[in-house]
Amino acid sequence: MIAENDHDYIIRIIQFLDRQFAIRFFISSRDFDILYRWWEKRIPTRVINGALGRVVERRLAQGKPIVSFSVFSREVRLAYQSFLNLNVGHERNELRDEHGEIKAFLKQFPQALEFLKADFTHLAAEYIRTGAVDSGPLYEKLLDRFQDDDELNAKCAWFLNHLAPDLRRPEIEKKYRLNYLLHKFAVPSFG
């Protein structure tokens, strides 16, 4: 069975292609399996996004369409191998502020999310203090507020229509909606 965070990872990759390159195609069960294998290997999304960008650039230059995630498999595999080789013996930078992204988000808080500012401030303080929080209730409020958003509803309808029928489940739709909003407002990760 697929866990909830699996869907999040998979949907972020699909949304990256849409946002960065306006590439949209029917997501078959085979495509979903490719994406799920990348998740199982824990390939960082920045590695995948770089590989996707290189493939898109090459295929556009050659005039070839992109209609499946299978065209990315080789490049993702090579990029992941390079990533693993580069990170052998890599030291962590302990001087980096591990909560810098959260603090920056709170300083530049999006006007459209003003109704959740107190919730985000409380969540951030708890996360910085304990290192673990339950962002679920806050995310539910976010989803409720934007349930009638025309842009989000149109994007979500398109996404669901381009999924294989057996993948069109409420939990995938919910994850798509949440990821769309988190990206749109540059909400940092709380865990």
Image (cartoon, helix red, strand yellow):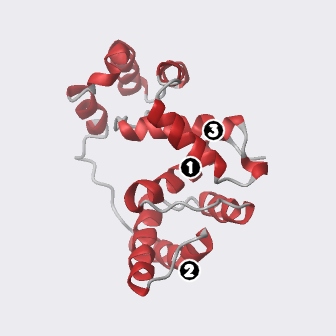
Front-most of 102 and 19?
19
Query: Camera-side residue: 117 or 128?
Result: 117
Quarter of the image where one finds residue 86:
bottom left
The image position of residue 77, as x and y in percent, is 55, 76
Of labels 2 and 1, the one closer to you: 1
Does residue 83 sit above or below 91 in this rendering? below
Q: Which mark is residue 173?
A: 3
What residue is pinned by disc 1? 11
Q: For this view, does 109 lie left or right of residue 38? A: left
Q: Label 1 sits on what residue type? A: Ile
Q: Is residue 173 left or right of residue 167?
A: left
- Where residue 74 is drawn, which disc sits there? 2
Residue 44 in picture, x, y percent from top left: 48, 59
* Label 3 element class: helix
**Image quadrant where residue 117 sits:** top left
Figure check: 118 above or below 12: above
